[in-house]
Amino acid sequence: MMFGSICRRRLLFRIHQIPGGGGGGGGGGGGTNPLQSIPPARNSYSSSAVADVSNSEPCPDTVSYLISCGLSPTAAAAATTGQRLRICSTDKADAVCALLRHYGFANADILRIVRSASVLLLVDPERILRPKLDFFASLGFKPRKLATAPFLLARSLDKHLVPSIQFLRGIIGSDDHLRQALHRQPRTLSSDLETSMRPAVEALRRGGLTEAAISKLLVINLCVLRLSPDRISKVFEDLKEIGMCIADSRSLYCFGVMCTLKRETWLRKLELYTSFGLSEGEVFSAFKTQPTMLALADDNIEKKVRFLLDELKLGIHAIMSRPVILCYSLDKCILPRCAVLSVLMREGRIQREIKLPQALLGTSREFSTKYVLKHADEIPDVVKAYEGLLKPFPSSSLLFRG
């Protein structure tokens, strides 16, 4: 029975993920989580910095301050009402921003923090923020990454952040790999250790993954730790259904993609690919080679496949023999490279029988060295083409062979 049929049966059941962000109240410099509810947070922050915010109307002074931080008037008003924020003293807010800059946060990072977690402007910078910033700095955590998950700065250092990092370090191993995993998915660190992370790891073990495989999987996609054990077991079943053995090194990358998509999404993408004339088996054969092909947005898939089919006259099976081409940007990579090849064909520098999509593949350095730098002095148009200033010639589809 094919995967699609299995998915359609299972759509009768709703899959819930364990929500992240539990636990970790005060203590260890944590205090009450200011991202949950501002009124209770008045017990944790200085009364001189926080006023009664029961009024749902935006506070003009707070809105003005947020605008001075870079927010638009609309965003500032929304942050004030949505997060029930009222700044009575700008001294503490200024001190928070100054501390963030001291730790290497750029103005764009601070703006991002203010936009999504304005309430951090109310905390005691020395007692609440500095210990956590020191902790993340000791891990080599980049400020710009932390700015994408600023609510981590509202979690308890002793009760949540330190135990979670110790747990992850024990599973992942080296600090380099831990840092890599956290940089990819910093939000996962908000997940509760006891109700989310530990149960997820145990489910991975029950599924048959070795400790080394679990470590590698978490580096690939740390968000696996946000899944419920039931969801993880279903992903293992799905892998088996498409003929992917967990001993296959590719299975971890497939797992990493499968766990990020709902079953409805899987079915829709499967139907999209089969609409081009592929069987389910052919789709999943390509998926095993390039798992991210099913993580692309539907319109992205449609646009790229249609270009390769209609403009370059490639067959669908030729495309799927190199599914990585679907993960290349059409506007920033595929079109400029086609333009370069068109120029070189026009000048007789490469054969008209050049193979596609193979010729379009490779890193930017590899393509540039082979097709651009080699001819740049004698044919300046290749540089213009590579920079996107020239488009492929209308007749270029007649020049390529798949």
Image (spheres, rainbow, N blue to C red):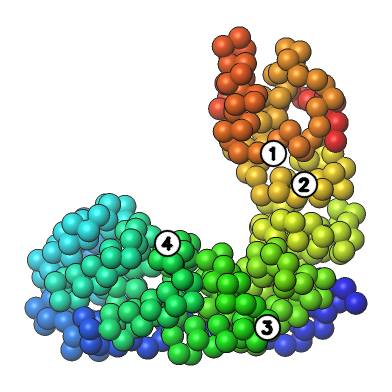
Can you say which quadrant of the picture contains the C terminus?
Answer: top right
Give the mark nearest the N terminus, 4 or 2: 4
**Which x, y percent locates residue 307?**
76, 40
**Which of the pair 205/329 is nearer the observer?**
205
- The amino acid sitting under disc 4 is Asp
Q: Secondary structure at mark 1?
A: loop
Q: How far separated are the C-alphas under marks 4 and 1?
A: 30 Å
- Residue 361's label in the rendered image is 1
**Which x, y percent locates residue 298?**
70, 57
Read off the residue under disc 4.
Answer: 176
Figure check: 185 above or below 41: above
- Residue 207's label in the rendered image is 3
Q: How far separated are the C-alphas under marks 1 and 3?
A: 35 Å
Give the mark nearest the N terminus, 3 or 2: 3
Give the mark nearest the N terminus, 1 or 3: 3
**Which of the pair 173/14 is nearer the observer?**
173
**Which of the pair 203/235 is nearer the observer?**
203
Q: How far separated are the C-alphas under marks 3 and 2?
A: 30 Å
